[in-house]
Structures are given as structure tokens and as C-alpha cells.
Image (spheres, coloured by chain):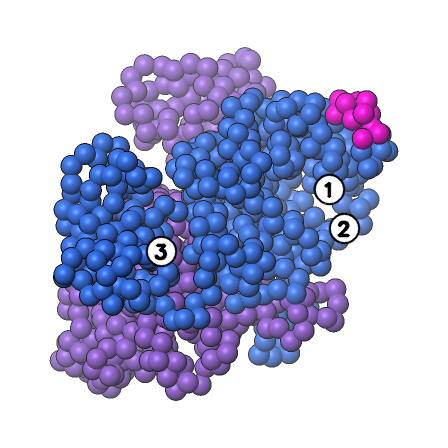
Chain colours: A purple, B blue
Amino acid sequence: MNSIKSILLKPNFYDTWTNVEIKGWIASNRGNKKIRFIEINDGSTISNLQTVFKGEKFDAEVLDQLKPGAAIIVKGTLIATPNSPQPIEMSVDELVSYKNVDDDYPIQSQEMKLETLRDLPHLRHRTTLLRAVMLIRSTLAQEVHKYFINNDFHYLNSPIITSNDGEGAGETFNVADSSSTDEFFGKGKKATLGVTGQLHGESYALGMNRIYTFGPTFRAERSNTKRHLAEFWMIEPEMAFYDLKDTINLADDMLKVVIRNTMAKHKKELKFLDSYTNNGLIERLKHFTETPLKIVEYTEALEKLAEVKDIFENKDIRYGLDLGSEHEKYLTEKVYNAPIAVINFPKDFKAFYMKQNDDNKSVASFDLLVPGIGELIGGSQRETDYNKIVKRVNELKIDQDDLQWYLDLRRFGQMMSSGFGIGFERLVMYVTGMDNIRDSIPYPRTTGNIRM
Amino acid sequence: MNSIKSILLKPNFYDTWTNVEIKGWIASNRGNKKIRFIEINDGSTISNLQTVFKGEKFDAEVLDQLKPGAAIIVKGTLIATPNSPQPIEMSVDELVSYKNVDDDYPIQSQEMKLETLRDLPHLRHRTTLLRAVMLIRSTLAQEVHKYFINNDFHYLNSPIITSNDGEGAGETFNVADSSSTDEFFGKGKKATLGVTGQLHGESYALGMNRIYTFGPTFRAERSNTKRHLAEFWMIEPEMAFYDLKDTINLADDMLKVVIRNTMAKHKKELKFLDSYTNNGLIERLKHFTETPLKIVEYTEALEKLAEVKDIFENKDIRYGLDLGSEHEKYLTEKVYNAPIAVINFPKDFKAFYMKQNDDNKSVASFDLLVPGIGELIGGSQRETDYNKIVKRVNELKIDQDDLQWYLDLRRFGQMMSSGFGIGFERLVMYVTGMDNIRDSIPYPRTTGNIRM
């Protein structure tokens, strides 16, 4: 079957092409008894194929009643139309089949508000805007897999239900059997939805060398903001024998390859989103893919911020500052005008598993910041010294028993290990320019919202 | 970096190759003060690289103390050894680094029982057996993604937390916020872990055309058998405009391509598993990939079974029989000696969403059965007639309100839609020959078991 995308991409289409079948859904329908123009979309691209019905063989009344959203199968001849907005249209020979929509079909216009569309997660991808976003989301995910396949990473499915809660912080969801008062996983056994796949990922990097997870993670945060989801997808690679710099290079290369390949596949969708969001989306993505990453020490970043501290809401620029979004954007956009990796943050606001540096106050961590959105990736080299990590766990009053299996990896051949995490919806927002994370995932879950 | 897999695969290795660095873990260590042989595994394959330490520059005592499981980095020269079991070994020039294991490292032998290893999900992939299984699992998952990418399917992330419980049958897990008595997703809102991604998948096939999910699904079944997991991964493609036969062809092609490609990449691992499981694993997989699928009517299958009904435990062979494992294996192994798709099952034991056939008693469904394991895939064409599906939902006393959004798809341009589901761990068992589903997933979750 020919997709509309493949038809419209045909670079040298001079002749006609007969007996082509198109299966899709009606985007628009206009005309009269003599001639009718029906635009069809088949889900392969946001672009529609214009089909032209002309002549006695068509029942004008049937055609007139077909509404946007209706399913339709047509056969016809493709014709080059070099002077029209679309280079190709179809002269229909046969209306093979159709199924109309009921009058209460909720997608009645392309101008519907995003808020309204969020009530319709089962239908909103049938608007041009959400179709563009969801096509790009799918391609981004597939390009992520391809990148790791091409670089000989093993794919790991970290468990979703777990008795570990990752960093020991944050709210977790509890999981329980509905049918009985007994605990499904054993008396007194904690069962939560995983907030990260990293700890289990480390166990597999130890022995498998280079792995990545790509799966759902959960946080029962009651923040109802444009940036929070209760259920979101994370990509978490973990590499034995990688130090901090190796890991930063991998993160940078992965992002650039994935975004470059996605841009090449979605020219139409990005052009549409660029125009919709109207603040230089394509320019920003191009700039990112073409600009080498700079590595910046946390202390150096502080100096740059201190020079202009009055412009920030949080002016308390000194060692120990957890960079806010305003600081991050200033650094990557104004100071360096490049993607940057800020490294060696103070250990106080970073996770217990990060490698402690010799200065005794910082950890071998990095945040990758990009112009336009700020932080996209966070990662670190892991602490592989058993005594150091146990001391840190106890300092932070994290339950050591729960984590003993993880801590023990240090005693069982973990020489060096590093990794990073990227929130997939955040990547989708960055590449599509969408402003609200609820529009970057098919069925968003947030506090107070579990539609369908 | 050169992986051991790529080194051992070098087809024409006659000369030496200097200054090669290997990073991995010690598989075995033998020798004396003058010469030492250390086998290293780096996670790229189950095969080890033999490294040879010879001469004054090495500290014999250090080398002697290195134990299996220890991390090690060496530099050396690769040398062809055509008369040895492995065609290549390394003459070590430099012991770059190492980190030994503690004495209580639990993987002390390759002969450990599978039951014992299940208590060590964070370490068991460091045995040859589980390494082979988990390498193949990773490749199978990656080949599944590649197959759908190459065939222009969009990847959909169906929601994990959902207010729908799929087929209305089976036990579901409830999800709740731990921190308060309020309901996180809204007062009185049901929140369960999804048992299938199909319903949401259908909503995206409508508009996106061809999608697939590949994500975790959950069932709170208290069956403690070799075939049940509480958390497992499902692949669920859904295609608009596909009928039953199109769907069967897709399922057959996907399986064959994925298995063929995985076999090509894991010759060593499959040879090991073939010998370990000792019942013709490779022969069976080859037979499957080379034998065309046969389509068999359910009624025809019944006739074949009735001819020999006395050999079955369940001898009640008549219309309405839900094929048991014994019947499935007999059909695919003895009658047809081929993969078969049994089609048009009685509606009484099939899901409400399957398309009702004109005979008024069967549905357009299929089970794909393969010699050696029985059912691998189940699927169907979907009922797209709104009135028929609503009638069926009410007959089965399923709550219509919960499903109204899904039923409404029929009124909004769903002309035809089909799909199937494959339990990924079942595929892993089939390809690796493992007998217990707990050994096909890194961190198995079953009733009474949530290790780590």
C-alpha cells in the first residue's frame, strides 16, 4: 500500500500513476453536484491528499453527506499538479467504501482549544496539531531505540512494580491486589510503582556492560503544573567502565542523532509546529544539532551568574545553589549560546549514589542544558566505593536494608559505572515546541485526571 | 572499543593486532607463577576471550588472587590460535586496572540451580545460562521495534494507570497515593494497572492507521505456575483497514523476521541453549521460520481432534470447546507439523470486542499456534458495528459507562480494525527454550515475590 507520505514525497513525479488505492479519513469535503474535492489523511503525515470526484459514476448525494472524520477508501489515478499547493492529487475512479461519522463527532474544527482536546485523548490525535506531535513522539521513541541498537546497547526492562523507591525521595504510588485483604506480594511487603529504572539498570550494566531502559516511571506528585505528570516515560542508559566525560559525550551524541533523524523525517510536521508555536522552533533545533556541547564547571557557572545576579529572582548565587530554571536558561542561552553540561554539583542536593569527588563536597554529576528549554538530561558517575556509599546512605537516613542488594554491587565487581536519565515527554516538548506536558503524551495522568 | 563478540567474529584473522583494550569481568583464572590464563567476558556474547599473562612485568600474587566476577581492564595483542577451541586469544601487555570481588560473591559456579538464581535477579545474568537468555531477550525486543519501524508502524505508549480494565475479566491491581486518604486521581475514580494496551491502541489506529504498543501489562493472578507473571510485557499492534487474514499474515511475518534475525545474531547463545535444554531448540526454530503458516478453521480443528479424542485428558471435543494446551500442541505438531492459525472461534469464550461473524455464533478471531509451545499470539478483527458491540457488552454485563469512549470509536469513523497481542516473555521462552517464565524476564514479579 502507498502511504500519502510516500506519494507526496515522490521527487520526480511527472507521469500519471493509475489504480492507486488510498485508505484514510476525510479531512475536508467541498464541491457541488458536478465536481467534489475531498481531502484525505491516512495518518502517515499531517499532509492530506486531495481527491477529485467528477462524472456520472458518483452518487452526488452520497458524496455530499460525507463528513470530516469519516473513513473512506478510494481508487484512482495520481496526477501531477505542479501549480497547486500540493504537487500531486488523485482523480478518483472508484469510491470503494466509506463509513460516515455521527453528528456528535467531537472534532468539529481545527481551531479547538488544547484544554478542550485534553478531554478527548482518544480523538485529539485526529487534529493536525496533535497528529503532528504524536507522529514526532513515535519517531523520537523509535530513533532512541535505533540509536542504542546501532551502538550495541542491550535493552533492559527494569521492573515497574518494585520494593525500592529509587532515590528515597518523592512520593510513590502503592500497588495492591483488589480482591483480598492479604498482600499479593507477601505479608508486609512494600509494593510501589518504580520512580526510576536506574538501580536495576546498574545491576545489568554490571555484566552486560552497556544497557538502556525505556519504560514508564511514576511519581505521585500533587503538583498540577505544565511540567508534571504522574506517569511518564524515561530513557536511562547505564554503562560500565564509562566515566563522567564519556557519559556526557554519549548523551550529547544521542540527542543530536535522534533529533537530526527526527527532523529529517518530519519536515512537514515541524514546519507546521514552527508556525503554530511561532518562536523559532526549527531554528532552535538546528542550532542545537549544529553546536558543539560545552562542558562547564559548576563553580564557573556560579561566577557567570554572579556577574549579573540582579536579573534573577533568586539572587543568592553562592556555592550550594541548586540552579533554577532562570539560571539554567541564562547560562545556556546568554552566556554560552550552546548546549552545555554543567558538572560537579555540590553533593548536598544530589542523589546518594553519585560518585563523591576528591574535594569532599561535590559529586561527579552533570546536567545537560539546552537553549530554549533548560535541563534535558541529568546524569552522573556512580559511587563504586562500598564504604563511601554506605556512609552517604546513612548520613541521609535512607533505609540501608532495602538497598543492600544495590549497595552490594560495589563489592561484586563494579569498578566504574555511569548513566543518565532523560524524561521522554520533556524531549517531546523540546522537539515539538509544545508548552504543556499534557500535550506530549497520548493519555496524560495527573492528579485529579485519569481520563479513559 | 572492540567488543569480544566483534573480535571473535573476525572472519579472516591471520595477523596480530596490537594495543587492543578489553574491559570486562573474569570468567575463570588458572595458571602458576610463570604463566596465567584469565578468561574475560564483556557482556557482548556468552563467549569469553582467553588472555595470557606471561613474564616478569606481572605481579604473580596479584594475578593469583583475582576471582571470577572481578572487573578487569587489560591491554594486549590479539593472536590467532587456529588449533584452540577459540580462534583468537590475547597476549597481555598491561594489566590496566582491576577490582576484585568479595568472598561472599554469590555466583560461585556455573552449575547453580535456576531456583537459587531466582533469588539473585541482580546477579544471575552473570552466569552463562542467564546471560544467554537475557542477551536474546534484548535482541528480540530490539528486533520487534525494528520490524515495526521498517513497516511504517507508529509506536504508541498506551497508559499504564487506567480506569479501564480491558476485557472486564481478570484481576487487576489498584493504584493509590500513599500519602493521604484522598484519592489521587479524583474522588471515587478507579485507578488500576492496565491489563492490555489494546483499547487505547484502537483509538490511535483510528487516525494513525497502523500502531503498535510494547509496554508492561499487569494481572493480579494468584496462580503460582511456570506460566504466570503479575507483570509482563505485551506487544499489541492495531491496524485500521486490516481484516483477519491481513492480520494473520502480519503476525506470521513479524514472528519469522524477528526470530530469523535474532538467530543470526546469537549463534553462540542458541547453540549453548540448545545443548542446555537438549530437546531440539535450534531445529524447532529453523522449522518454524522455514514452514509456511496454515490457516485452519476452528470447526476443521475440532474434526481432527475428534478423530483421536481418546488421547486427550479433555475428550469432550465439540463446538464450544476452548482448546487446551494438549489440543493445541496436537494440532500444530502432529496434524499439520507447521505453525497454524486457528480461526473463527465460538464467541462464548472470546472477548466482547471481537467481530461477530454472520453465522451468529463465531467471531473473527485467531490463535497462532507453533510446534513446541502451542499458542504464541491471539488476535481478532474488531467489531465495528456500534449496535452489535453494545448488545454484546450488555449481554456480558460489562459496565457500559466505563467503556463508552471506546464504544464511541465505532461511531467516529472506525470502518475496520484488527490487531493481535503477543506476550513478550512467552516469545522469549519459545526462542530460548526456557521452561519457567520467571527465567525469561530480569526481575520477575509473581504472587509472593517482589525481590528488589
Residue B9: tell me if it is visible. Answer: yes
Residue B306: where, in percent of width, then height?
Answer: 82, 25
The residue nearer to you, when weighing B176 against A403, is A403
Kind of residue at disc 1: Phe
Q: Which residue is mark 1?
A: B352
What crowding class fits label 1: few (fewer than 14 Cα within 10 Å), some (14-19), or many (20 or more)?
Answer: many
Give the CA distance from mark 2 to mark 3.
Answer: 59 Å
Q: Give left or right: position of B311 versus A264.
A: right
Q: Which residue is mark 2?
A: B398
Which residue is depicted at the point 22% across and 39% down? B80
Q: Are marks 2 and 1 in contact (CB under 8 Å)?
A: yes
Q: Which of disc 3 and disc 1 is earlier in sequence?
A: 3
Kind of residue at disc 3: Ser
Give the CA distance from mark 2 to mark 1.
Answer: 9 Å
Give the CA distance from mark 1 to mark 3.
Answer: 56 Å
Residue B181 versus residue B449 in the image, above or below: below
Write the start and end of the magenta stretch as one range.
B299-311
Residue A315: where, in percent of width, then height?
Answer: 24, 84
Mark seen at residue B281: none
Q: Give left or right: position of B187 versus B89.
A: right
Q: Secondary structure at mark 3?
A: strand
Kind of residue at disc 2: Ile
Q: Main secondary structure of the magenta part?
A: helix
Count up the numbered dots. Answer: 3
Residues marked 1 and 3, same chain = yes
Judging from the image, mark 2 belongs to the subunit labelled B
Q: Quarter of the image holding residue A375? A: bottom left
Mark seen at residue B28: 3
Q: Which of disc 3 and disc 2 is earlier in sequence?
A: 3
